[in-house]
């Protein structure tokens, strides 16, 4: 049986590392591509979800972090820093712990999900909460990394995108060719840029015969690409993508335009409905930001814009267990308590 060795070792020939580099890995990548039957029937296409919540810290950030941390160790730095809406900090904290590095994370106060906060704490990161949003946190850590001996591990670090492009390789490896359309949520815009790089590289060198159209989805209250300019006070229930001034602006525009795709917005209500739908009908529990592409796909289908029979892959970026409070907010749970008795159980279930 093939044993998965993490994305740096699996795809080393396509990454900027050699055999002699000491790899910082938690075994990330190799995530499932799951067929979404009920959604496929509704939209009239073949829809698959790339379940990135299966990564070691529960999000796609781990692909970028193994590459960034491997480079940090190679350069001899001892401290890493990042701004985060929660997942980058969770991932940076875990990989830094594994590599024996100090990790500093800067997060918008009160705006990150409890599970992500717990991850940064238990992995021993130095946590700084900022009375500001993600964009302002990123401005601070960029300045810090220019003036002090700390390595920046946000996606403006090019090694992050190198690692994250491997998800596109896996999708092609799993399907046998590129999909017709690839969808994903867009926040700071690193991931859309990384996927486009990965799909292009695989088409240029053989494994894929073509590149997909890239359809990006933002939250309505945090949709700078839809507005065409940065947004000052982004707001959305999908805290992971509560971002108004994406760092990889030009790369994301290139991914959209060169692929013949689009970037659109969906409402928080549509996001939460898509999250429930994916959990209840497909069996995949994702965090709100990850449901944005599903919401965008359902909206496009409602307008008759999904090509019949197309193969569509959607990256669902983070695990639902990171933010159970938001997922349960719409549920009235009436707990049924019974004595230890089979008859009572049967009665409670109406059997
Ligand atoms: N989905 C999730 C679950 C995320 O955590 C993020 C970004 C995105 C989508 C958007 O990806 O920024 O590459 O466009 N989270 C970052 C963080 C900003 O700090 O964890 P992007």
Image (cartoon, rainbow, N blue to C red):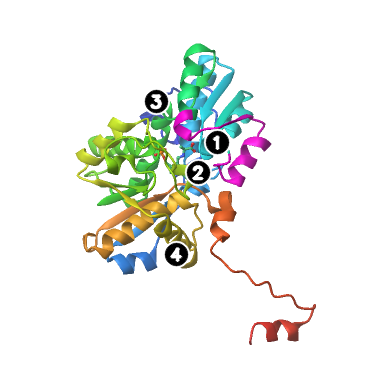
Asked if labels 4 and 1 touch by Cβ distance under 8 angstroms, the answer is no
Determine if the C-beta at disc 4 is less than 8 A from ligand 1. no
Q: Position of residue 278 (x, y in %)?
A: 45, 61
Residue that label 3 marks: 158
Determine if the C-beta at disc 1 is less than 8 A from ligand 1. yes
Mark drawn on residue 122: none
Of the image marks 3 and 2, the number of the one nearer the N terminus: 2
User: How far apart in space, not on screen, are marks 1 and 4 (Cα)?
Assistant: 27 Å
Of the image marks 2 and 1, the number of the one nearer the N terminus: 2
Q: Nearer the viewer, mark 1 or mark 4?
A: 4
Residue that label 4 marks: 277
Looking at the rendering, the quadrant in which ligand 1 lies is top left
Which region of the structure is painted magenta? Answer: 110-136
Indicate yes or no whether the magenta region holds residue 285: no
Determine if the C-beta at disc 2 is less than 8 A from ligand 1. yes
User: How far apart in space, not on screen, are marks 2 and 4 (Cα)?
Assistant: 20 Å
Relative to 7, does residue 312 appear above or below in the rendering?
below
Residue that label 1 marks: 91
User: How far apart in space, not on screen, are marks 3 and 1 (Cα)?
Assistant: 17 Å
Crowdedness of circle 4 by 10 Å Cα count: few (<14), some, many (20+)? some
């Amino acid at each position: 049986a093939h044993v998965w060795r993490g994305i740096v070792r699996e795809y080393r020939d396509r990454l900027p590392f050699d055999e002699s580099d000491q790899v910082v890995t938690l075994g990330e990548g190799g995530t499932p591509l799951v067929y979404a039957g009920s959604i496929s029937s509704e939209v009239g296409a073949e829809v698959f979800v790339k379940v990135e919540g299966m990564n070691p810290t529960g999000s796609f950030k781990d692909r970028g972090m193994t590459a960034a941390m491997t480079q940090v160790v190679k350069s001899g730095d001892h401290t890493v820093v990042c701004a985060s809406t929660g997942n980058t900090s969770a991932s940076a904290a875990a990989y830094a712990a594994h590599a024996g590095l100090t990790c500093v994370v800067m997060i918008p106060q009160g705006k990150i999900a409890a599970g992500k906060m717990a991850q940064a704490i238990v992995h021993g990161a130095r946590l700084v909460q900022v009375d500001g949003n993600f964009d302002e946190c990123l401005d601070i850590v960029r300045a810090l990394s220019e003036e002090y001996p700390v390595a920046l591990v946000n996606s403006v670090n090019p090694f992050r995108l190198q690692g994250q492009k491997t998800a596109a390789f896996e999708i092609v490896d799993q399907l046998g060719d590129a999909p017709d359309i690839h969808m994903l949520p867009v926040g700071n815009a690193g991931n859309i840029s990384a996927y486009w790089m990965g799909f292009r590289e695989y088409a240029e060198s053989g494994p894929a015969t073509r590149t997909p159209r890239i359809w990006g989805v933002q939250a309505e209250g945090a949709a700078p690409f839809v507005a065409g300019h940065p947004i000052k006070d982004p707001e959305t229930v999908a805290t992971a993508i509560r971002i108004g001034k994406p760092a990889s602006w030009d790369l994301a525009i290139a991914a959209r335009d060169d692929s013949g795709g689009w970037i659109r917005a969906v409402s928080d209500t549509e996001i939460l409905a898509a999250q429930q739908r994916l959990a209840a009908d497909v069996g995949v529990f994702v965090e709100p930001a990850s449901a944005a592409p599903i919401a965008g796909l359902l909206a496009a289908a409602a307008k008759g814009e999904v090509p019949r029979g197309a193969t569509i892959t959607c990256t669902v970026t983070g695990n639902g267990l990171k933010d159970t409070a938001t997922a349960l907010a719409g549920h009235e749970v009436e707990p049924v308590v019974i004595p230890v008795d089979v008859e009572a159980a049967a009665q409670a279930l109406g059997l």
